[in-house]
Structure formats: C-alpha cells, structure tokens
Amino acid sequence: GENVEQHPSTLSVQEGDSAVIKCTYSDSASNYFPWYKQELGKGPQLIIDIRSNVGEKKDQRIAVTLNKTAKHFSLHITETQPEDSAVYFCAASEGGGFKTIFGAGTRLFVKA
Amino acid sequence: DARVTQTPRHKVTEMGQEVTMRCQPILGHNTVFWYRQTMMQGLELLAYFRNRAPLDDSGMPKDRFSAEMPDATLATLKIQPSEPRDSAVYFCASGLGAKNIQYFGAGTRLSVL
C-alpha cells in the first residue's frame, strides 16, 4: 500500500522567511496530492492540492511542486506570518479511489 | 456555511463502556471518512463509505469498532467495549465525487479511563 513520509517534523522560521516541507510517496499509482493545515483544536483544512498532470501550482503565498519521477512533492510558504503557525499534512491518493494516506505532519512555528 | 458536524466534541468514559460518535456530512457529499489522530500514529484512516456503502474498513479493529451510515445525513462510529488505547481524536470527513477533496469536521476527543 501507499506510504507517505514527511519532513521535517518541526520547523521554526522567522516571520517573513520562507518555509519548505517535503514529502515522498511510494505508490506510483497515486496521482492526487493535497496539503492540509490543522490549527489547534480544529480538523485539517485543505489549503492547496496538485494532480499528477501538473508540476507546480501556486496560490498567493503558497505553492506546491511535484516530481513524479522521484515520487516527491513539496509545500512552499513565502513571506510567512504568525498565523501560518500550525501543523501541515501532506497526503497522497489514487484518483478515482478515495483512500488517502497522510504524512506524519510538520509543526510550523513562525516567530514574530 | 456548509460544514461537517461531529458530536460529541468531547467524551470521557470508562474502560468497557460503549462509545458512539456521530457525523453529519456536508449535504450532497457522497463519501464519508473516519480517521483517528494520535501523537504516535498521526492521522489513520479507519473506514470510508461511498453512497452509504462501506468501501474499506481495513484500518479499523474489527472486534470492537463498527462504522455505519444509517442514512445519507448520518454516519456513526461505535466502539464496544472501549479501551484506554482508544483514547484519541476521531475525525469525520466528507467529500464529493472524484474530486478527492475531503472536508473535515472539528473532531471528537475521546478519553477512555
């Protein structure tokens, strides 16, 4: 089955700096890669996603890149703000199927 | 404001007791997922349904856990009997069609003493 590894487990950056979180997956059939943000006491919320026919996707300060050959994808947050502090999860699933496997999460701290 | 609603938000119970968690998916969504979140294991998929039919419950301990969808507006996750190791936050998520996007509820924090 699919296995998703996520690094780092904790990331601390200064406000205004960039943050990068990396994930690898094992199942070459996976073709949908969402990223979720979880704030304290809440459920994960989708912030951006990418499908296998696209190499990069941007939405304001966040971007995701995908390298299908190497089976890895990354989340990039630029100009970080204190409100970006949260736990971020990457995930992988096979389109058409719905089984989504999550990474272990990255706790991001943005210091003001 | 469409959202997934989970009840109860918190549950404290004693070992051996039955626990039932409920989820109301977003109206019109046809897939429902149950996840368990712990510090050690992260987010684990327990079971998921499509059009109320169970598609996969391989992540669920079969001897004590059961998941059902009595109707399109209600999904339940039951633990009987509960054990201290079941203490976790249980999330329900719903989605629509082949988009794979999942919308999570706020979770049920379960403590089994």
Image: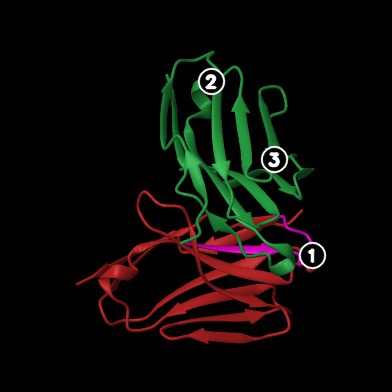
Query: What amino acid type should be assigned to the residue bearing mark 3?
Result: Asp
Q: Chain of mark 1?
A: A
**Closer to the eye: label 3 or 1:** 3
User: Which color was chain B given?
Assistant: green
| Mark 3–mark 1 CB contact (< 8 Å) | no
| Mark 2–mark 1 CB contact (< 8 Å) | no
Compared to residue A43, the image places residue B74 above or below, namely above
Q: Which residue bears the numbered disc 2? A: B83
Q: Is residue A14 left or right of residue A5?
A: left
- Residue for point 69% across, 70% down: A32
Q: Quadrant of the C terminus of chain A?
A: bottom left
**Closer to the eye: label 3 or 2:** 3
Marks 3 & 1 on one chain: no
Q: Indicate which disc residue A96 carries.
A: 1
Query: What amino acid type should be assigned to the residue bearing mark 2?
Result: Glu
Query: What amino acid type should be assigned to the residue bearing mark 1?
Result: Gly
Q: Which residue bears the numbered disc 3? A: B71
Q: CA distance from mark 3 to mark 2?
A: 28 Å
Magenta-span inclusion, residue A90: yes
Compared to residue A40, the image places residue A109 above or below, namely below
Marks 2 & 1 on one chain: no
SS assignment at label 2: loop
Q: Chain of mark 2?
A: B
Tell me where residue B46 appears, x and y as whole percent. Answer: 65, 41
- Residue for point 61% across, 33% down: B77
- Residue for point 53% across, 54% down: B104
Tell me where residue A6 appears, x and y as whole percent. Answer: 54, 62
Colour red belongs to chain = A
Q: CA distance from mark 2 to mark 1?
A: 35 Å
The part of the image, by quadrant, that contains residue B80 is: top right
